[in-house]
Image (spheres, rainbow, N blue to C red):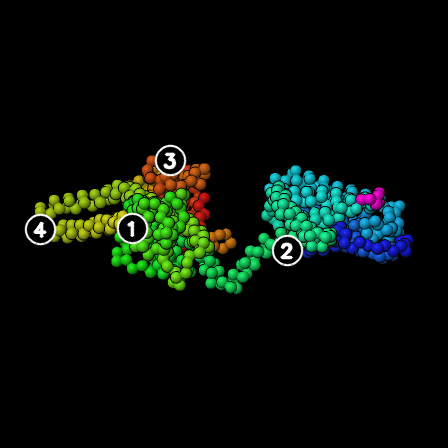
Amino acid sequence: MLPAYSDKVIVDNMSWYIINYLLGSLSSLGAGLFVLYRGETPVSTRRTWFALCVSVSGWHLGRFLMTQSPTAAIAQHATVIVYLGAILIPPAYLHFVLSLLLEERKYSFLLIGAYGIAIVEFVLFFSGSLLNGVRPYFYGGFYEIPGEFYLVYVASFVLLPIAAFSKLLGSFRRTDAIVQRNQLKYVIFSTVIGFMAGSMSFAPFVTQDVPPWGAPLVYLYTLPITYAVAKYRLMEISVVIKRSVIYAALLVGLLIPCFLVVIWGQHLAFNAVNINFSVATLLLFITVGFFFPKVRFRTEDALERVLFKKGIDYRETLLRSSHDMVSIVDIKALSEKLVQTIGKSLGIEKVSLLLSNEAKGSYNLEASVGLDFEHPERILLSRDGPLIKLLQSRKEPMVKEELEWVPVGPDTPQTIETMAKLGAEISLPIISKEKLIGILNLGHKEDNSLYSNEDLELLSTLGNQAAIAIENARLYENLKQSQVTLRRADRLSSLGLLTAGLAHEIRNPLVAIRTFTQLLPERYEDAEFRNGFQGLALKEVDRICGLINDLLSFARPSKPNVAPENINDVVDNIVRILEAQAKEKGIVVVRDFANDLPKAWIDREQMKQVFMNLVLNAIQAMKGEGSITISTREINRTGTAPVGHFVQVEVRDTGIGIPEVNLDHIFDPFFTSGKEEGSGLGLAVSHQIIQEHGGFVTVESKLGQGTAFFIHVPVGAPVRTKVNGTAQANEANLSH
């Protein structure tokens, strides 16, 4: 047992460091609980940090009780709480660091040794060998007296944190991960402060003239580490230090004059200064200065929701709509949504949107609400008009009433007149890349209320979002136009190759018909000749008509039409056209179509173009005789994405094959793999068409043996849809 003292000590309960002992206990425990239940790091790290915080909290609580103890006997009991925490702090810190670095198992022997030392210290403490009682302390309460084995605790306090600190530094030097390096910076920086402050608790063993100045810093160091452990995305520590210094300087600059005014006021009113009241007032100022900026915005938001709910609702609606607009890729749908949303949310009677037309050099009416123009297509503003010039130069909303009061130039009357014709009280510029791409005109509100600065700021934000959405929609339209141009070029290229093959196929029956026609006058009386000629001529003419109809069907532009189709019919239609060209080169076309295939939702004409390109490629890939086998089958894919029910079309040739290095590029536009024929667009266009159908293409090829293309088209409802101009497409791309 510890030796007893009977001395009684009168404690100064207002000592600042005594209060900090209590604050330290509470804040350390709170930091541990916060990380344990709200942290984002692994569970083991959160638990070890919680254990360390509990130890630090216990140390602070024990110190507080010792300062408040009226007798030595009570203080002796308080030392139990102090050293329950103090003895566990070094091993708990080491455990936390190893857990943070994910090295618990690797250095498990080190942890066993650390906790073993702690057990020895507890034995020494409870046997009375670690401490030799307590004594009165000048700065309040009592302080312990070291025993003969106290150096065991000192060695643990020094060596275990040094071991943990060396692990931190080593990991910091080795890692290249930016987030982890920043996290370790917080832990290293805080560790240095915390253990240096904690070491000051040994100073009273040497002299009583040194108060425990480091006590507050022992718990303050837990706060940065709590932030580092609780969050993955950490602010750079140098930024934190800079901001803290700036914030502290601002606080000091504001609080010192206030503090001096408080002291001067006391002296003036009471002819005396109460230091306790002054310190309490200073702490109150600091608390208000720290929490007021945070509380202010939350309070404002809460009061607005209660007292001005309508304003909050329309702001949320506009902000939500601004995010939705970015996904709309149709200019008309985007424009309609923008004017309708603003008109409905703000209760505006008249809203109109004019967008720039580069070709005409004007701004044309794209959408409107509440305006009844006889010829809306004629509503346009010249690029050199006064309103356009004003918005382009000032890049801020123009308020008609303000222009009437304060003219901004000689063209102000014309500007006001233009706004009046558009029913606009406010004209809001839509700017993209420093260029005016549109004008949003807003009329009177239905309740005739004014547009506040907050309204204008919110509308300006919405205008910026609208500018991005409009540019995206225009880029999408340009992309669609480019795809149409590519497909047209590819179709024309295919037609050129087709006509060469068909010319020979048509010329042969025409020669036969011509010969029979020349002989007909001489052998007209020959009934057998006449009947044979009639049957042959009709058969050859029907064959020519069939070839020409197939060619026209392929060449004639058609509107997109997705419908359930028999894939065998579509493939066979193309094979009939190309079979003659294949035969001319000595190539045999083999059909291996599966019966009872389910119908696939496809655009028949677009898929014709796909199969045309693939069969033509196969013909061109063979330098001499060979074969092309076209197979169809039904497959179900599970496990590997994309999964589902597909119709597969295989086009396999016995040509020269594709080098492996080129397989990644065969679907690139204008890539020809050394072919003398073709534009290099066929496979790129085919790949795009299949993707738009929600399908995918795979390729197998071996040099000298041939190539096989596998086209997969989904069975079921169509996948290409548009909802309010928003693109909805399956973009599965498994080409390789």
Residue assigned mark 3? 674
Q: Secondary structure at mark 3?
A: loop
- What is the spatial separation of the Cα atoms under label 3 and label 2, in whole angstroms? 61 Å
Between disc 4 and disc 3, the foreground one is 3
**Residue 368, position in %: x, y?**
33, 57
Q: Secondary structure at mark 4?
A: loop
Q: Amino acid at mark 1?
A: Leu
Residue assigned mark 2? 38
Name the residue at 81% across, 47% down. 117
**Residue 217, position in %: x, y?**
72, 47
Q: Amino acid at mark 2?
A: Arg
Point out the stretch of residues depicted in magenta: 205-210
Q: Earlier in the sequence, mark 2 or mark 1?
A: 2
Q: How many numbered dots are placed on residues in this image?
A: 4
Residue nearest the observer in this picture, 168 or 3: 3
Residue assigned mark 1? 380
- What is the spatial separation of the Cα atoms under label 2 and label 1, in whole angstroms? 57 Å
Between disc 3 and disc 1, the foreground one is 1
Q: Main secondary structure of the magenta part?
A: loop
Q: Earlier in the sequence, mark 1 or mark 4?
A: 1
Q: Residues within 10 Å of mark 3 (few under 14, many from 20)?
A: few
Residue assigned mark 4? 525
Q: Earlier in the sequence, mark 3 or mark 1?
A: 1
